[in-house]
Every structure is written in C-alpha cells, then in structure tokens.
Image (tube, rainbow, N blue to C red):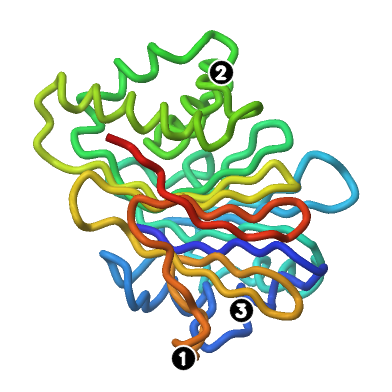
Amino acid sequence: MCRWIAYAGQPVYLEKLVTKPENSLIAQSLRAQEGKTETNGDGFGIGWYGSRETPGLYREVLPAWSDENLRNLASQIQSPLFFAHVRASTGTATSRDNCHPFRHGNWLFMHNGQVSGYEDLRRELENELPDGLFRDRVGTTDSELMFLLALAEGLQETPIASVKRMISRVCRAMRERGVAGALRFTAVLTDGDNLFGFRFATDKLAPSLYYRQDEEGLNLVSEPLDSKDDQWLPVPPGHVFIRDRFGQIEVRSLDIM
C-alpha cells in the first residue's frame, strides 16, 4: 500500500515533512514501519496551495528517494496546506496519471488502501460516473475512481456524507459481485480550506492514520514522522478527522453500516 502526509497551518516549506524528519516521507518510501509493504517505490506526488484557488501538482513515476527534483521543490515551495504521497501499487500500472494526489478543481485527494476484486468491479463503478466526471477520469486506479464517485455523490456540498455514500456504494457492488475480500480506505481530502481524513475498513485492518497539532499547524500522516510517540494520536478505525478553516479539530464516527 502507500504512505502519505498532509499539513495545514502556518506556511512552511514542504521539506519540513517530506525530507527532514527522521521518519520523513522519503524515509517511508524506502522503509515504511506500519505499511503493508515496506517499500513504496511506484511513484510519488505533491499537491500544494498557494496564491491561486487551484492547487499546484507535481507527480512522477520515479521512486521518491531517487528524484532530486522532489528534494529541490520541497526546499523551495512554501505552503499553508499541502499533500505528499508515495505509492505502492495494488495492481494498476505505474504511470504519472496513477500517482497521487488527484486534483479536481480546488479539491485534492489521496488514498492508502485497496478495493478487493477491483478489476471485476471497475467497469460497473465507472459506469456510475456522470459523463462530465467520466471524462475527467485519466488514470486506472481504484483511488481516483473513488474520488470521482465521491464528487458524483455531492462532495462539493457535503464532503463527509458524500464519502460515506461512496463507500456504501462500493461495498454494495462488492456484495452483489460476491467479492470476499475487504475494502480498506484511509484517505484525506481538502477544498483548500477544510481538511478531512477518513479511516475505514470492512475488516479489522484499516490502514493507519495519525495526527499531531503543534505551534505551526496540523500533521495528518500514515505513520508518525519521529519517535515522539506520545505526541501522535491515532484516528480510530471507522472515524473521520476534521480540521475546519479556523483550525478547529474534531474526530467523529463515520457510522457506516
């Protein structure tokens, strides 16, 4: 699976989380401590907000640890809200279009998890996209498809409710197809103001999710960036993490049946 980080707060250089910490995202791309796979070398991406409404995006198929462009960008780009992701493919091709984060208008989305039986479900789920969102489908991953399905469910107006409806839709398709495996969904999305982190699985193996608030801002991560374990709080399985535009934090149950 994958590893990712999200930050919101005072503007900081991306390197503060991507390359500098002892367990930085670059370090996790080589030796993840809590992921299903230790190495995450199937591409990477960063997305950040600046002075424009639409976020910037840089994605590449090289392993994150070997791309000097990533290190140079991370040392120069300063942002109050950014995402970074290193990918371990669960079956789809290693291509730039399949690297996270995914962008749609002012929204960013990235994911760590899997949809069991995805190849059997893919056509059915893609057919449920309205024409406009189907045209926006450029990659082949389950992650991008779930993002677009959430948009189809009303993400712009009701982010949490739309993600719940999307998860329920995917679970229903899995049941109808007789898929025995699990849906695992740990993801983060933002409209540039509010940030939402989700941790859910149909079994007991929801991918990890932690957060820490310090004097500069919020870190929401797949695994802690350092050994200060008492400062990192886990988001429980079956819950959504919310940071609103005013910096207020809430963790609530998703209540998905």
> Which of these two is toward me, 145 or 26?
145
- Spatial CA distance of label 2 from label 3 is 34 Å
| Residue that badge 2 annotates | 133
Disc 2 + disc 1, Cβ < 8 Å: no
Residue receiving disc 1 = 227
Task: Find residue 114 and report its horizontal and vertical position in percent.
Answer: 29, 45
- Type of residue at label 3? Thr
Q: Residue 165's image quarter?
A: top left
- How many dots with numbers? 3
Left or right: 172 with respect to 150?
left
Mark 3 secondary-structure assignment: loop
Q: CA distance from mark 3 to mark 1?
A: 16 Å
- Residue at image position (78%, 56%) is 246
Residue assigned mark 3? 19
Label 1 sits on what residue type?
Ser
Residue at (64, 55) in percent of width and height: 243
Q: CA distance from mark 2 to mark 1?
A: 42 Å
Quadrant of the drawing holding the C terminus: top left
Which residue does the image show at 84% across and 53% down from the upper left? 50
Residue 179 percent across, percent down from the top left: 12, 31
Q: Residue at image x 34%, y 70%?
A: 39
SS of the residue under disc 1? loop
Q: Is residue 167 above or below residue 6?
A: above
Tell which of 147 and 200 is nearer to you: 200
Determine contact: label 3, label 1, CB under 8 Å.
Answer: no
Give the mark, 3 or 1, whose residue is nearer the N terminus.
3
Give x and y (percent) for residue 100.
53, 48
Position of 38 with respect to 10 (left or right) is left
Q: Residue furthest right?
A: 51
Depth-wise, is mark 2 or mark 3 nearer the camera? Answer: 2
Kindly identify the amino acid type of the residue bearing the numbered disc 2. Leu
Q: On residue 12, which mark appears?
A: none
